[in-house]
Amino acid sequence: MTLTKADLVQQIYQNHESFTKAQAAEAVESFLRLSKNALVGGSDLLLSGFGKFNVRDKKPRRGRNPQTGDDLTLDARRVVTFKPSGTLRDKVNKG
């Protein structure tokens, strides 16, 4: 099962009587926009009790085309990694 953005909006709408569905959608969009902007800007995103998103720089590296077997160089790039908090990790492992 996958939790979608629409599911988040619905949960916020149901759990906060003062929110309209449009306000719940805007709250989710605002959070995601702030999160994306932080990561694009190179900042880490720490959500206490959930985990930390990091932006890492990867160096160029050697690769291989699996169809032809030719060697090639993969470009340098930035990647987002996630490290769950101890609290989340414990809850996931306990089921």
Image (cartoon, helix red, strand yellow):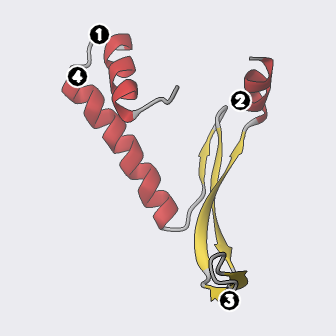
Disc 3: which residue: 70
Q: Position of residue 65 (x, y in %)?
A: 64, 80
- Mark 1 and mark 2 lie on one chain; the one further toward the N terminus is 1
- Check contact, mark 1 vs mark 2: CB within 8 A: no
Q: Residues within 10 Å of mark 4 (few under 14, many from 20)?
A: some
Label 1 secondary element: loop
Q: Amino acid at mark 1?
A: Glu
Mark toward the start of the polypeptide (3 vs 2) = 3
Coordinates of residue 10 in the picture (x, y in percent): 33, 20
Residue 56: horizontal and vertical position, in percent?
Answer: 66, 68
SS label for mark 3: loop
As helix, strand or loop, the secondary structure at mark 2 comes to: helix
Cα distance, mark 3 to mark 1?
Answer: 60 Å
SS of the residue at dot 4? helix
The residue singled out by tag 2 in the image is 88
72 to 29, vertically: above or below: below
Residue 92: image quadrant is top right
